[in-house]
Amino acid sequence: MTDAEALKRDAAAKALTFVEDGMRLGLGTGSTAKHFVDLLAERVRGGLRVIGVPTSEVTRKQAESLGVPLTTLDETPELDLTIDGADEIDPDLNLIKGGGGALLREKIVAAASGRMIVIADQSKMVDALGRFPLPIEVNMFGLAATRRAIETVLAKAGCSGPISVRTKADGHVFVTDGGHMILDAACARIPDAAGLASRLHSVPGVVEHGLFIGLATFAIIASPGGAEIVGRVGH
Ligand SMILES: O=C(CO)[C@H](O)[C@H](O)COP(=O)(O)O
């Protein structure tokens, strides 16, 4: 395992200490969340009773193959705890998510959870969000018009870098689990993440965006010195 993967696994292992018997869990998506599901499955094999809602088809397949019992938000609309990764984490624990394209389900699941623990290595901590291109999930209908409206909103919010349609390694357009496309907006720095989050929601055609404002309860950040709990600055 590379050093980076070992750090992700350290964060995932610490998050597992917050999981209690009987919990209803949101299971995140991405390479860090994958470690968590692996470790959770070991505990399940050892007798831990939990039930999980996966945030993507990838996570669903992983959890299913490892024998982690799964449910849906339709059957279980309230969850105790979601554990998920992030692409960027600011000092107020606002996040950019969606690098893996699962932001819509990730946000629905996090919002249905009493608590959300973000797990990451130290490279994800930033002073201000925006260096990681902001994923914006859009309906395929009217793409050009939606894109222009998003450009206007971004420019008014002081973030007017280029926007690109996400593609896969084979060059084909990336399609989300919900059947939508993703626009990645290179913002460089987002001066007011909460303001931009609500303005983006006002654009018809925007299904969801990767700004997670006020959803994280705390973060577990792994560095070579160990995995530490990070709360909101001032809390
Ligand atoms: O938001 C996500 C997927 O949509 C991931 O949590 C995010 O991209 C972090 O992934 P990784 O743990 O692989 O760095």
Image: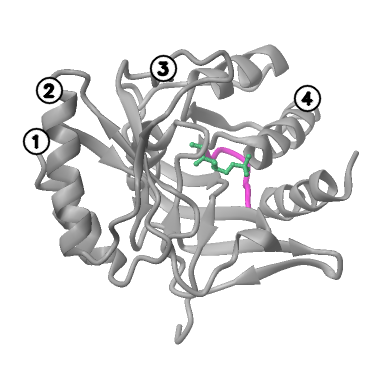
Residue 21 belongs to magenta span: yes
**Span of residues in magenta:** 18-24
Where residue 23 appears, as percent x and y from the top left, is 53, 40
Q: Kindly identify which residue carries mark 3.
A: 173
Q: CA distance from mark 4 to mark 3?
A: 38 Å
Camera-side mark, 2 or 4 = 2
Camera-side mark, 4 or 3 = 3
Q: Is residue 32 left or right of residue 175?
A: right
In the picture, the disc for residue 45 is: 4
Q: Which SS type dominates the magenta stretch?
A: loop
Q: Tag 4's secondary structure?
A: helix
Task: Give the residue type that dot 2 points to.
Answer: Gly
Q: Is residue 59 left or right of residue 44?
A: left
Q: Nearer the viewer, residue 122 or 68?
A: 122
Task: Give the residue type that dot 3 points to.
Answer: Val
Q: How many marks?
A: 4
Q: Kindly identify which residue carries mark 1.
A: 204
Q: Residues within 10 Å of mark 3 (few under 14, many from 20)?
A: few
Task: Give the residue type that dot 4 points to.
Answer: Arg
Q: Which quadrant would the C terminus be assigned to in this image?
A: bottom left
